[in-house]
Image (cartoon, coloured by chain):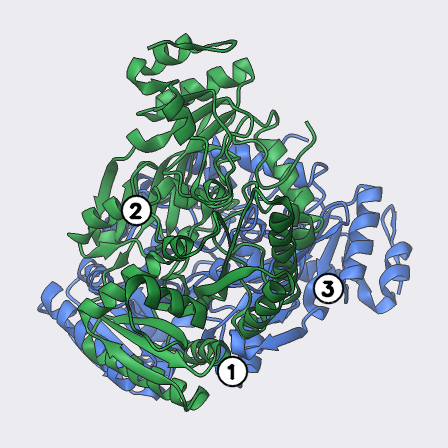
Chain colours: A green, B blue
Amino acid sequence: MSTETGAQDWRWLSDALGDDAVALDEHSLAQHGKDEGFARQGRKFLPEVVAFPQTTDEVVTVVREAARRGLRVTAWGAGTSMEGNGLPTRGGIVLDMSRMNRIVSVHPEDLQVVVEPGILRPDLNEQVARHGLFFPPDPGAPATIGGMVSNNASGTKSAKYGVTRDYVLGLEVVLADGIVIRTGSRAIKSASGYNLTGLFVGAEGTLGVITRITMRLAPLPAVVHGALGRFSSLDHAAKAVAGMIGAGVTPAMSELLDEQVIRVLNAEQETGWPERATLLLEFDGSSTAAVEDELELARAVIADVDPGAEFVTSSPDEHRRVTALRHGLGPTIFRSSSKPHIKVLDSTVPISRYVDLVRATRTILGAHGLEGFQLGHAGDGNLHVLILADAKDPEEWARVELAEDDIVEKALEFEGTTTGEHGVGLGRKRFMEAEHGRATDVMRAIKLALDPEQLLNPDKIVDIEL
Amino acid sequence: MSTETGAQDWRWLSDALGDDAVALDEHSLAQHGKDEGFARQGRKFLPEVVAFPQTTDEVVTVVREAARRGLRVTAWGAGTSMEGNGLPTRGGIVLDMSRMNRIVSVHPEDLQVVVEPGILRPDLNEQVARHGLFFPPDPGAPATIGGMVSNNASGTKSAKYGVTRDYVLGLEVVLADGIVIRTGSRAIKSASGYNLTGLFVGAEGTLGVITRITMRLAPLPAVVHGALGRFSSLDHAAKAVAGMIGAGVTPAMSELLDEQVIRVLNAEQETGWPERATLLLEFDGSSTAAVEDELELARAVIADVDPGAEFVTSSPDEHRRVTALRHGLGPTIFRSSSKPHIKVLDSTVPISRYVDLVRATRTILGAHGLEGFQLGHAGDGNLHVLILADAKDPEEWARVELAEDDIVEKALEFEGTTTGEHGVGLGRKRFMEAEHGRATDVMRAIKLALDPEQLLNPDKIVDIEL
């Protein structure tokens, strides 16, 4: 293997990590230059080299030496992010964490696990299931836990089970100067100093490289019931979810699909569902009585909110199939369209404004003449808008971005946030001043305090003059 | 009213806030110079002046002018903190937030409320109860919400309901230079930039003065059942709680009392309880079926862990009485003792190590010849150790501090934290390096980035050379 490319000599890197832990070939560079969201917009950024550390010490070595040489270092998970969150905008070194994928220890009696960041979510869940435990946040994608932590990922289960940050008790982090710190502990609560753990979660790798994660888990529910609600309108569906939560019943899953999504599902997957606004629901708990109780309450709320609604429970098999369909929706919609690119929004608003956002989005898509779908995690106010277009058609893509501007503006007007789960990365930086005002200066101050040379995952979250 | 004291002329302050918003009298200064914990150790620090702002603008004026004059500013809630968290160690201005105590808005459909920081927890709960909502963290003390936020307070309900940080969605904060920022939003999840909200929560007022808080609340449970468990030993009681949580049943309250505490209760309150290690339990939920289900599971776990245990449910009246007894325990124990001072520890460990901490604590108290009681929030691994002694007896107080050192050392050895809920303040600073190692440098860097002159609540959490 050659260890030279362009002006850089990477021998120091293979000396430190071993030849087979350094990749310079075109395929590896290309693989680490695009994520799920940006690839579908035809955008990429190539690293100069990909390194595969196996230990914290190796990460320290790379970060120290990179700092000495003024090279950028960007940590990499599974490449499933949506907004260019881990793309090496300025080349440099991509640290692919996939070989640091061990479970360090399991503490079943504490419902806890300590992992390395490269472990994949499905692998973690498979391994802790034997202890009756699971890590609930489920973004659909087979992300790494390190990526989920860095992005504060969430997904279908968050209204009931919370987001990734809620599960992280402690971290080991390699800072920009190569110092290793440990935050938090295995205690489930603490008032001991600044909440560094919560700060590194969601920092998208811009403040340090996470090398170890102490997490709490949840007990696998003993009883899970799926159900489908079909409503007179999207508004009714959204109101039903708010009503359930207000009544003290938070579904483990409450996925909203608009009529257009149902049409695509019927065409692509032969679901044969009525073309109505639909909620995919899941209720879970520690006993049949408790879950049946929740189902009854949900049924009552739905009948009250929308007498024309239909509410049917699913068999376990049906529910599994429905959940898989939901997780495959992005690709299914993408396939169904003649457009080559897709942009996926994830603005999130208080649940009382969800209907308003759904309506405003419909108007905005129409006004810009765009093909769009609405689905989302209704229970937590998270609306996904999938806009299909041709990124190489500047006029059309400009309309996509104008629609995004308008939708985000509405989300902020409704006291919500630009991004509920995809993170800022590169794609949402332009909304940060509008959303956070002068608090962006505090974000800059923190970045500069921890990474003054901006060596770690540059150009993400907020721009800083170098 | 005179507006001059010592070398300082406070006319600018009464010009800005009004005469009745500035206090210089001895009583007011003394009131704002001691908190609940330090007072019981005979320690205090007097401010030079107490100001009572009524608006964010007034806070800005005070902070700006104080910065210009190089005066320290320390925000003040209800004075119920335990570790000197809000004591004006270097004099200056205490900002008493009690007049900023309005509910700004209630959003019942979102289970949210926006409040000013000076509102008291009981007042908030009384006012949102009409919407079927409550703010669960319950430290017992009638703290202000601003104080609870700044301390990341928790208490009896945290194992099931989480800590204060889990309920804070957004903040308005006046920074050390008088800039006002707004963090977060009313969306219940966000991946939009660094988690500033979570950073200001628990920062004990050292990074900014909180002037507005957006909070989520929980639906008041429809059904609440109290119960008492009496065990063969403290170990058995602790194991029973861990067993319930492992089985998917988290009690809303699981307060552990050792035999000595029961003896004091019997003597002081005529409870007439068996002198056994006791758990005060509460189970709640959205339906009778669900709660009875939990009670059954709890009963089964207890019988399994300790065949000699007794488990009895309480009537609502009994449960209210028991809960009040629990919240009054600190003062009750204090009254029962001939010792004039008390130190209350709150180290927290993973639940699997709770029994180890209980045992180690017993040994440590014995070794130092001290009078101590053990109680705590068993569900979240939080152990309170109440040590009674005479702070004016240097030899005896030195033993108290040595015992504290030993207990905290054990908590850290068991992968726990120095303080689960009381915060660092002044009292726990000496443990920060042992607990956090080089992460304390990151805390210092953040403090210096946000408050380089250390104007806000000086000397708390970590020491920084000026």
User: Residue at the spot x=67%, y=50% of the render?
Assistant: B208
Kind of element beneath mark 3: helix
Q: Can residue B376 be seen in this snapshot?
A: yes
**How far apart are labels 3 and 2 at the CA level?**
59 Å
Residue B437 visible in the snapshot = no
| Number of the label disc, if any, that sits on residue B27 | 3
Question: Mark 1 or 3, which is nearer the eye?
Answer: 1
For badge 3, the amino acid type reads His
Tell me the tag on residue A121: 2
Callout in the foreground (2, 1):
2
Instruction: Tell me whether marks 2 and 1 sit on the same chain.
Output: no
Q: Looking at the image, do the residues carrying marks 1 and 3 touch, with CB atoms under 8 Å apart? A: no
Q: Count residues near mark 1 (Cα–Cα under 10 Å), then give few for <14, some for 14-19, many for 20+.
A: some
Name the residue type under label 2.
Answer: Arg
User: The disc labelled 1 sits on which kind of residue?
Assistant: Ala
Q: Residue at x 23, y 61 (%)?
A: A220
Image quadrant where residue A315 sits: bottom left
The residue shown at (57%, 44%) is A427
The residue carrying pointer 3 sits among few (fewer than 14), some (14 to 19) or many (20 or more) residues within 10 Å by Cα, namely few
Per the image, label 1 sits on a secondary structure element best described as helix
Horizontal and vertical percent position of residue A123: 24, 44
Instruction: Give the spatial CA distance, label 1 vs label 3.
Output: 35 Å
* Numbered tag placed on residue B129 in the rendering: 1
Question: Residue A84, image x and y in percent?
Answer: 50, 40
Q: Outermost residue, front direction?
A: A338
Does A466 sit above or below residue B324?
above
- The residue marked by circle 1 belongs to what chain? B
**What is the x, y in percent for residue B346?**
41, 53
